[in-house]
Image: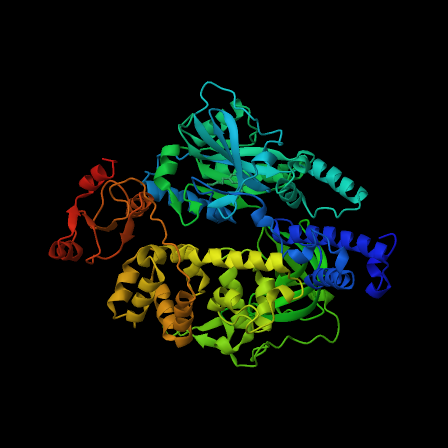
Amino acid sequence: MANKLDLMPIEDLSEKQAVQELARLAEDIINHDKRYHGDDAPTISDADYDALRARNVAIEVRFPDLVRADSPSFRVGSVASERFDKIEHRVAMLSLGNAFSDEDVVDFSQRVRRFLKLAEDDELTITAEPKIDGLSASIRYEKGVLVQAATRGDGRVGEDVTANIRTVRDVPLVLEGADVPDVIEIRGEIYMSHSDFESLNERQVAEGKDPFANPRNAAAGSLRQLDSRITAARPLRFFAYAWGDVSALPADTQLDVVSAFQRWGVATNTLMKRCSTIENLLETYRDIEVQRASLGYDIDGVVYKVDRLDWQGRLGFVSRSPRWAIAHKFPAEQATTILEGIDIQVGRTGALTPVARLVPVTVGGVVVSNATLHNEDELTRKGVRIGDTVVVQRAGDVIPQIVSVVADKRPDGTKPFVFPTVCPECDSHAVRDVNEKTGKVDVIRRCTGGLICPAQRVERLKHFVSRNALDIEGLGAKQVEAFFKDGLIEGPADIFTLEARDGESFKKLKDREGWGSTSVANLFEGIRERKTVSFDKLLFGLGVRHIGGTTAAVLARTYHDLGGFLQAMEMMTGPESETYQDLIALDGIGAAVADALVDFFQEPHNREAVVALADAGVRPTPLKMQDTGSPVSGKTVVFTGALERMTRAEAKARAEGLGAKVSGSVSKKTDILVAGPGAGSKLKKAEELGVQTLTEDEWLVLIGDG
Ligand code: IVH
C-alpha cells in the first residue's frame, strides 16, 4: 500500500480516508472470502482475516454514514456457493479410486477379471490416459448445441457455469458430426496451461492483485467467476474424457467414444491409449510420467479404464467410484522444513491428533504450514522432536503429512515429545481404549470428557453444519464456533430455535459484530430451509461413529423419517434385538455400524438431542428411492446358493443398480429370494414366510437380462 492507510489508527482517519479504506477492505475481504470458500487456497491466516473484518466494522462504527451497500458486514462468510444456480446432475459425477503402486494396479485388473468371471486367456483391454489436475465439468449438448454446463459440486449437485464454459475455446458451442446424439453430457477437466498460468500471474501482480498459488487454483478461480467476461479473459482449457446423461453413444468402447468427441470438435487428450496387458499399462504409466515435466500442464497420475462399455456397465459402481476405472497416482511431492511446534487438536470423537506447526514451505506449488502427525504411535515411531528438520509430503488434496526426520540436522538440546494424557481442552483423562475383541490397544488417544469437553461439542456442531451434512448457508464452522463460545447454541437443535430466541436469551444477532439485518435474515432463512434437509444428510450430521454418507443413505432409505428412526433405535438394545438383526442384514451395514448406533442411543443426551431436533420442527425429507422403472426397484432381494451366470458381487451390484436393496438374510421384509443350487436354510425360511422365490434364470428374465 503506497499511502499506508491500512496501518493508520481509525481515530486518525479523515472522512475521505475512511471512504478509501472501506472500499479497500470491502474488496480485500471479498477476495479472501472467495479464496476461502471457493476452490482456491486462502492466502492469509484466520486471525489476519478477522482483523480485516474487525477494522471494517470499527470504521463503520465511527463513520456510520459511510457504510457501503456492499459492505462485508452484511455478509457472513462468502455466498460463493449460492452465487451460481444449482444443477442436479442427471447422472452423478463420481470420483476415482486410487492406486499407489504397481501391485495396486495388478489388484485392480484382477478384481475386474474376477468380477466379470473372465478366463485367464480372455483379453481385457484397458485404456490409459493422463489424470489432469484441474476441476471437472459436465457440458450438456442438445441436438448438438451447448445448452448447459455445471461444475462437479458434491457429485450430485453442481453449479451452473454455462456462461463461463461458453468462453472456453476448447469447448465448441456446437458439435459437428452426423452421429452427434440428441442429448449428450460431455465430461472432462477444465485446466490452465503452465504458460498461461504464468502470464496470468504476471498480470495479477502488475494490477496489484495476489498471484494464484498454482494452475489448478487459477482455473478454479477463473471458472467460478460471476462475471463471465472475467472468465473469458482467463485462458482456460478443456480435455473431454467421460460422459453423463446420453441418448445414444456413438461407439461401444471408451476410446472410440472419446475419439468421437474429438471428431465432433471437443478437445481430448492425445496421450490416451489402449493396453492389453498389465505390463503395457505400467509401461504407459512410466511413459507419461517421463513426459510429465514437458507436457505444459499439471497432471497427477494416469487413469485406467476398462475399454469395453458393456463391461463397464456390468462392473458398475461401488460407493462413489466406478469399479471399471482407477487413478494410478504419481508419488507425492516432498520438501524439507523445520518443525516449530506440535499442537494437539481435539476432534469430534475426542481423538487427540498431533499437528506439526512448520516453517512455511512450498510443496508441489502450495504453501504448507501445518501437517498431520496422525497419532501418538506415529509420532513416537518417527521420533519427531520440536526443532527437527522434517520431510513434508503432500499428495493431491490430502492433508500434508510428516514423512520423516532428517536425523543429522537435529539441533542440540531437543527432547522427545511427551504426548499428553489429559485433554488439552477440558483436562479430562485422555485414554487409549483396548478393543474387547482383539485385545489390541487403539492407536488413538481419546478425551473421555464427552460432552463436557467444549472441543468435542463444538466439533460435533461443526460437523453437523458441514457441507455433506446440514450445509446451512451463512452458518459455517467460524460462526458455529462464535455462537458456541457465547452460549447461543449448545446442541444441534439450538440452531433451529435460534430465530425464536433472537433477542430473548441473548442480544439480538443483528447487533453482533460482523452481522447486520440482511445477513441475519439470510441466516434465518437458510436455517428454516434446512428443516427439511434430506434425511441422509441429517443422519450423517449426527456424527455417529462409522456412519459416513453412504451408510447414512442406507439408513435413510430404511427408516424414512426421524420418528421411525428414533423408534427403531429405542428398540435396538443390543445384538439380540430384532432391529439389530434387521439392520445388519442390510447391505452396507455391519456390526460396527449397528454397535455404534446402540452406543450412541444408549447415551441419554444423544437421544435427547435427536428428540430436540424433532421438537424444533426439523422434518427431514425422505430419501428418494431411485425409481429406475425396474420391477425390482425398491424391493429387498436376497441371493443364496450357487449362481451360475454371474458372480455374487455382480448380481448384487446389478440389483442395486436397478434400485433394489440387497440383504444378506431372509426376514419378513424380504421381497424376493434368488436361490441357486445348494440353497439351504434361507430357502426354507423364505418358503415359511411366503417370500417369492426365483431361480437365477427367472431373476434374469425379471430384470430384463434373461
Ligand atoms: S474419469 C466416472 N479421467 O479425477 C469416472 N477423471 O479423482 C470419471 N480426472 O473427478 C472420471 N483426469 O475430475 C477421469 N482422464 C481422466 C481424468 C479424471 C482428471 C479427475 C476428475 C475426477 C477426479 C477423480
Vertical placement of residue 447 versus 211, above or below: below
Q: Where is residue 23 in the image (x, y as percent from the top left)?
A: 77, 51
Find the residue positioned furthest to the top: 178
Q: Identify the colour scheme used.
A: rainbow
Q: Taking 124 as reference, is 393 left or right?
A: right
Q: Taking 68 as reference, is 258 left or right?
A: left
Using the rendered image of the protein, determine whether residue 474 is visible from the camera's viewpoint. Answer: no
Q: Taking 469 as reference, is 395 left or right?
A: right
Across the whole image, how many numbered discs are drawn on residues?
Answer: 0
Q: Nearer the viewer, residue 262 or 305?
A: 262
Vertical placement of residue 623 versus 195, above or below: below
Q: Nearer the viewer, residue 316 or 529?
A: 529
Q: Position of residue 700 (x, y in %)?
A: 23, 39
Q: Which of 126 and 488 is in front in this view?
A: 488
Q: Position of residue 514 (x, y in %)?
A: 66, 62
Q: Quadrant of the C terminus?
A: top left
Residue 393, picture quadrant: bottom right
Find the residue positioned furthest to the front: 65
Q: Where is residue 347 in the image (x, y as percent from the top left)?
A: 54, 68
Using the rendered image of the protein, determine whether residue 375 is visible from the camera's viewpoint. Answer: yes
Find the residue positioned furthest to the right: 3
- At 62% from the left edge and 40% from the top edge, which residue is drawn? 223
Vertical placement of residue 607 versus 269, above or below: below
Q: Taking 692 as reference, is 76 left or right?
A: right
- At 27% from the left edge and 42% from the top edge, which residue is drawn? 646
- At 60% from the left edge and 66% from the top edge, which residue is drawn? 509
- At 16% from the left edge and 49% from the top edge, which residue is drawn? 692
